[in-house]
């Protein structure tokens, strides 16, 4: 894992957005699709802002882009304002020219009976697109990436998972109380994420400092699922000074 530390999250996010834009343009020039793995939450918001700005002001086109989001609460309706489907449309998809059929977000309304087949098919669809070229990640205070909570296996694929109490507590404000936070989610697996050709993890603020240090410098363990990223040869942690403050 390489670490890049920026003085603040705005300049850091702009630099990540530019890496994504350069990749999209390179693939365009080659006449190829660009497959992006995307995250929600507070960490990537400024990256999406910059991508939208580049689309509006510089004509960056997303016509050749295919996206796969990491996760969605379960159960969850798309139109619910707490859904990740809603988040992605609000922050990115409604403002760019990506073809609707190129957008993939785990469906929080799939019935229990269909879940297993649905999740297996999500991974297959990623593979059929040639795999993820660029995967954007945040990190939870439990050490999760996507919603791969502590205990997640290195070989896990897309699946249903029970959310950690800390994760639900962190989401309580958005849901106006922890009792309203769903207990489960659909998440891409660790194996799914590690197959990406390039991974960039974003972390801002002092609340992420200790888990960032464990992920980067600690043992590779299921107890800190983000530590599996040490096994990936093209991963960068993009941090602000606060999030990097516990690194040796
Ligand atoms: C969201 C996701 C999560 C978040 C993580 C950090 O799609 O996969 O792993 O990235 O919970 O959330 P924020 O950025 O809100 O601190």
Image (spheres, rainbow, N blue to C red):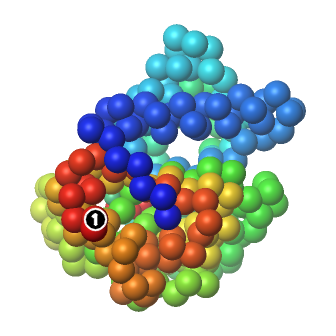
Judge by depth and name the residue closer to the eye, 114 or 233: 233
Judging depth in this view, the residue of 82 and 11 nearest the camera is: 11
Query: In the current view of this chain or complex, which residue is farthest to the right?
Result: 31
Q: Residue at x 20, y 51 (%)?
A: 242
Local packing at callout 1 (Cα closer than 10 Å; few below 14, some 14-19, many 20+) is some
Q: Is mark 1 within 8 Å of ligand 1?
A: no
Q: Position of residue 185 (x, y in %)?
A: 42, 70
Name which quarter of the figure residue 245 lies in.
bottom left
Per the image, the residue denoted by label 1 is 247
Q: Which residue appears at 22% of the width and 65% of the height?
A: 246
Residue farthest toward the top in the current orientation of the protein: 57
The image shows residue 181, relative to residue 160, as above or below, that is: above
Locate residue 64 relative to residue 204 in the image: left or right.
Answer: right
Residue 136 in percent (x, y) is at 51, 51
Please give the name of the residue rendered at 48% of the width and 39% of the height, measured from the top-left corner: 16
Give how far across and how far down residue 158 sits, in percent.
58, 73
Q: Is residue 184 visible?
A: no
Q: Seen in the image, is 227 located left or right of residue 22?
A: left
Q: Is residue 30 above or below residue 213?
A: above
- Camera-nearest residue between 120 and 58: 58
Taking depth in this image into account, of 165 and 221 the one nearest to the observer is 221
Circle 1 — which element? loop
User: Which residue is located at x 49 percent, y 25 percent?
Assistant: 52
């Amino acid at each position: 894992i390489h670490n890049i530390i920026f003085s603040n999250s705005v300049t850091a996010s702009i630099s990540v957005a530019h890496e994504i834009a350069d990749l999209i343009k390179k693939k365009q020039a080659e006449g190829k699709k660009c497959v992006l793995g995307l995250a929600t939450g507070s960490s990537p918001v400024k990256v999406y802002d910059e991508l939208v700005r580049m689309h509006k002001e510089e004509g960056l086109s997303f016509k050749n882009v295919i996206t796969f989001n990491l996760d969605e609460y379960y159960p969850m309706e798309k139109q619910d304002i707490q859904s990740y489907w809603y988040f992605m449309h609000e922050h990115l998809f409604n403002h760019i020219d990506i073809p609707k059929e190129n957008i993939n977000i785990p469906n929080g309304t799939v019935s229990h009976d269909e879940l297993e087949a649905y999740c297996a098919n999500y991974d297959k669809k990623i593979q059929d697109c040639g795999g993820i070229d660029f995967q954007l990640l945040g990190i939870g205070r439990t050490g999760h990436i996507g919603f791969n909570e502590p205990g997640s296996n290195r070989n896990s694929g897309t699946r249903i998972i029970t959310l950690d109490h800390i994760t639900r507590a962190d989401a309580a404000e958005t849901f106006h109380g922890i009792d309203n936070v769903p207990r489960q989610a659909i998440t891409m697996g660790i194996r799914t994420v590690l197959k990406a050709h390039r991974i960039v993890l974003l972390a801002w603020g002092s609340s992420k400092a200790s888990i960032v240090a464990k992920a980067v410098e600690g043992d590779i363990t299921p107890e800190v699922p983000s530590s599996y990223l040490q096994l990936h040869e093209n991963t960068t942690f993009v941090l602000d000074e606060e999030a990097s403050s516990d690194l040796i």
